Amino acid sequence: MQDDPWKEWIRKAEGDYRLAKLASKANKPELYDGVCYHAQQCVEKYLKAFRVYHRRSYKRIHPLIPLLEDCLEIDPAFEFIRTPCDDITGIDQFRYPSDFANEDDAKLALRSAKIIRKFIREKLVLPKLPKGRKSAREKKSR
């Protein structure tokens, strides 16, 4: 474990984000579920990273709205990402065999994750990343 546990959350979130983007670019129906799942996981981990960054505990839960509410206790500006959190909430249901994501689900999930990721990265004062690159700050954390 590194000195700053929140960076571990960022690293995991970025992995999920990249997987969602890769699966989305393939544009194959059998990967839409994966896009949704990894987009939701990215958001969940970014929300938890924000809590840990502020030396707050986080709930060991997966629903996004309670995690968002926890972040609102620290920064009311998180209200800005409520709609994308609502949009992606429950989208990880596609991990189960009875439901399958379609292209629109995948696009909505990735778009929501992108908005939330950008918002939280700005709150954590993390640099914008060129495609496929890690920031020097994140590289140091290894």
Image: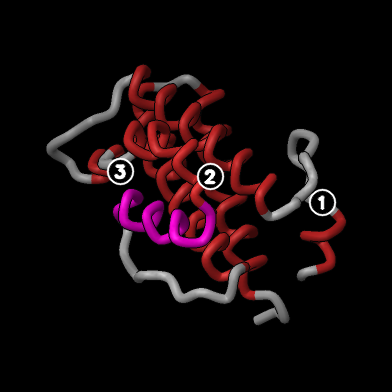
**Secondary structure character of the magenta stretch overall:** helix
Magenta highlight range: 63-75
The secondary element bearing badge 2 is classed as helix
**Residue drawn where x is 47% and y is 47% of the image:** 43
What residue would you read off at disc 2?
77
Magenta segment includes 27: no
Quadrant including the C terminus? bottom right
SS for callout 3: helix
Q: Which residue is mark 3?
A: 92
Q: Which residue is mark 1?
A: 135
Q: How many labels, in total?
A: 3
Residue visible at 40% across and 52% down in the picture: 68
Circle 1 or circle 2, nearest the eye: 2
- Location of residue 17 with respect to 51 vertically, above or below: above
Compared with 95, 86 (above or below) is above
Q: Earlier in the sequence, mark 3 or mark 2?
A: 2
Residue drawn at x 77%, y 60% is: 138
Q: CA distance from mark 3 to mark 1?
A: 28 Å
